[in-house]
Image (tube, rainbow, N blue to C red):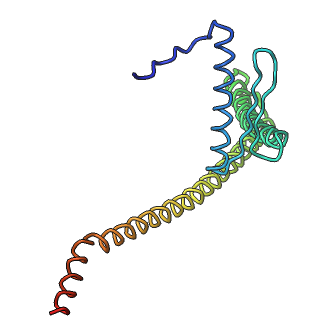
Amino acid sequence: MGRRKVEMKRIEDKSSRQVTFSKRRSGLIKKAHELSVLCDVEIALVIFSSRGRLYEFSSADSLAKILERYQSHHEKESEASKDVNEALLSHTELLHIVQSQLEEPTVEQLSLMDLVHLEKQLDRALYEIRARKTQLMMESVLTLQEKEKLLKAENELLEREIEAMEKNEDDRIEVVIGFSHPEHLGHQNQQQTLSLLQ
C-alpha cells in the first residue's frame, strides 16, 4: 500500500501536530548536517516552535559566526545596489536638469559658463557610471572564475570516483573469471591423479 500524499495545511489535532513537528524538525536538522558534511558548506538553521521554543543547528563552531557572515554579505549587497541606484538616480536627475534647461524657451539666455558647467556635470556622471559598471563587471568575472575553479575541482573529484568505481568493477570481474569453473579444475586434478596411478 503506497503512502498517501500529505495535504499542505495546518494540522488541526494538537498532539498530531506536535508529533509531526518533532519528527520533521529532527529530519530537517539531519538533512542540514548531511548537506554540510557532504558538500563542505556552512549551514545555520533556526526554528521557533509554536510555543516559542528555540531549536538551532550550526555546521560551524557557532551560529553567531554564520549569522555575522550573513549580515556582512547582506550589507555588501545592499551597499552595491544602493551605489548603482544612486549612480542611476544622479544620472537620471542630471539628464532631467539638462533636458529641462535646454527645452526652456530661455535656452538662448544660457551663458557659455552655464553650458560648460552642465557639460562637466554630465561628464562626471558618465565617468562615475562607467567606473561603477566596470567594477560590477570585474566582480562578475571574478565570481565566474571562482565558480569555474569549483566546477573543475568537482569534475576532477567525480572523474577520480568513476575511475575508482571502474577499477573496483574490473577487480571483481577478474575474481569471478579466476574462479568461474572450479568443477573444471577439480576434474583436471582427477585426471592427473588417474594418469599417475596407471
Residue 126 sits in quarter: top right
Q: Nearer the viewer, residue 140 or 36?
A: 36
Up-down relation of residue 128 to residue 104 (above or below): below
The reply, left or right, for residue 31 in relation to residue 156 is right
- Image quarter of the C terminus: bottom left
Q: Position of residue 32 (x, y in %)?
A: 66, 39
Q: Position of residue 113 (x, y in %)?
A: 81, 39
Q: Is residue 16 above or below residue 171?
A: above
Which residue occupies 80% across, 35% down?
Answer: 114
Q: Residue furthest left?
A: 198
Residue 101 placed where, x, y %?
73, 26
Q: Height in image: 196 above or below 42? A: below
Which residue is at the front of the view, 197 or 101? 197
Vertical placement of residue 38 versus 83, above or below: below
Q: Residue at x 72, y 33 (%)?
A: 85
Most foreground residue, 113 or 125: 125
Q: Residue at x 18, y 84 (%)?
A: 191
Q: How many dots with numbers? A: 0
Going by the image, does 72 lie left or right of 35?
right
Q: Is residue 116 visible in this depiction of the protein?
A: no
Res 163 quadrant in image: bottom left
- Determine if residue 78 is in view: yes
Q: Quadrant of the image for the N terminus? A: top left
Task: List x then y, in percent, for residue 24.
Answer: 64, 26
Outermost top residue = 12
In front of the other: 94 or 90: 90
Residue 20 falls left or right of residue 192: right
